[in-house]
Amino acid sequence: MDPADAAEPLPQASVSRAAQIRRLDALAAPVRGRLRVAGGCTVAAGWLLIAQAALVALLVQRGLVERADPTTLVPALLGLVAVGLARAGLLLSARRCADDAGTALRATLRRTLAARVLGRGAPWLRRQRSGGLSELTATHVDALDGYFGGYLLARLEVMLVPLAMLVVAFLVEPVVGALLLVTMPLAPIFMMLVGFGAQAASQRQLRALSRMGGHFADRLRGLGLIRLYGRGDAELAGILAAAEGLRERSLKVLRIAFLSSAVLEFFASVSVAVIALYLGMSYLGMIDLRGGAPLTLGTGLFLLLLAPEFYAPMRRLAAHYHDRASALAALEEIEHALADDVGPEPADATGGDSPIPSTPMAATSTAAPAVMLHGISVRHAGAANDALCALDLQIAPGEFIALVGGSGSGKSTLLEAIAGWLPLREGRIVIAPHDARVGYAPQRPYLFHGSIADNLRIARPDADQASLQAAAEAAQVMRFATRLPDGLDTVIGERGFGLSGGEARRIALARLFLRDPALALLDEPTAFLDPETERAVLDALVAFARGRTLIMATHSDAALEAAGRVVTLDAAGGLR
């Protein structure tokens, strides 16, 4: 990632700040009850501070000034201990409820995000960086936690606790109450001013973090290629530059957060000092604004104890204010990432008539479907010409079709369009029945790090060992698996590292057999196979095709002989 990329202008906000906050608050709906309990405990603990300060002042006044009998102070001491224990219990309960709510909320948000990402379909997913997508469910979701577990509680505390203290201060000493009232608006005004820059800084930090995550994940996947071409030092320099850009943006966010807290601390300290000065001058007789009986030591101590606690919720709110900015930035980044103009979804690729099922275990029809292509045109992103142009094709239920044509004629593109992996520029694809289960074995199958059996079970997670063995036998996987140390339980690397291209294709074919689709799409399933293995695979395909519709792209003469009909594509992406 070029450091300049992280400094690119942010997208303009499409909605008001108030609408963003409403959407952010709406995310807390599943855990609203726990957050309310946490907020109630926090407020109750704040109110108990008034009683705690009053009991301390009473003990000082009775014990030091009035020289009361120590035995008469026992009830007040017991009350002070009880209030302290009650506050500790309330704060502990508030923290536990907030933490439980945050954990549940993060899990819910991650499930929702994963479902939305998967729901965007293959055309959108193939254009995204997996590292960037992983940041949505990791760093971006974590950025929301501080808002719900910190800022919301502090906001509720600021609304209710200082108000109660202000009323008590006015009742005890109106002058001190007036001083608190005058200084009270300084905190929200300053935080509002700081907030204008805090969200933008947080958003830039999250975008830089997302880019760096995607960049790093991509480089890890291509580590072998990087080493092969001697690009290690250059890539390390790029990662270093990206990390430096992220460091700078993180420090900017921290600087704003510290500035907000420091200025509020300054104003709070000055306000407490003014109150202390007024009380001290009153005791010395240098000022008399009461016009009545002088203040007692207990009353002054009570007000001095109350003054810092009056500003404490505001200081906590300031400390959590950057969490609000980070949460708003994270929400906007998540919505921006999932709201890109990505063209038609996979369902649109079928003309809206028959969305292709996306889950292997969905309740789908097992009847062999008919496939009808009506004037479809497909153009790859960035291409000047169509890969498929106004193509019409009718495939009857149960047909075994072989697609042939020169390299670049659009065979793979046609299979991917039928599978729903590519959006159509025009035309429509109809699969009848619309709920037919579809299986696709691409030319370059993706294999995950794990055992061969794990890769097969992607098609059917509940498959037993006998089913795995049967699918592997039919696809001729066992021809090479028996030579491996642990057979089907042998661990292979990501993208099939450790296997040849033909072996990876056979695993993809076994995966398709295990899925048991009504419509099977195969792209060069017999490429790189020796004649004997190719013959065995084709025999298995012919047997598998009975009662199913099968479309296979191939260059093999033996595969053409096995097919029931041959469809030839020309260089322009049409039928010959």
Image (spheres, rainbow, N blue to C red):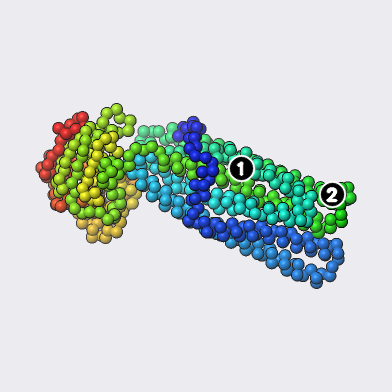
The kind of residue on which mark 1 rests is Ala
The kind of residue on which mark 2 rests is Leu
What residue do we see at 49% from left, 32% from top?
8
Badge number at residue 289: 2
Location of the N terminus by quadrant is: top left
Q: Which residue is mark 1?
A: 257
- For mark 2, does the 10 Å Cα neighbourhood hold few (<14), some (14 to 19), or many (20 or more) residues? few
Left or right: 340 as drawn, with respect to 389: right
What residue do we see at 21% from left, 38% from top?
374
Q: Quick one: label 1 or label 2, which is nearer the N terminus?
A: 1
Q: Quadrant of residue 67?
A: bottom right
Location of the C terminus by quadrant is: top left
Residue 529 visible to the viewer: no
Left or right: 93 as drawn, with respect to 365: right
Task: Identify which residue, 28 or 200, lies in the foreground.
Answer: 28
Instruction: Please provide percent x and percent y for residue 280.
Output: 84, 50
Instruction: Please provide percent x and percent y for residue 10.
Output: 49, 34
- For mark 1, does the 10 Å Cα neighbourhood hold few (<14), some (14 to 19), or many (20 or more) residues? many
Question: From what the image shows, is residue 374 above or below residue 458?
Answer: above
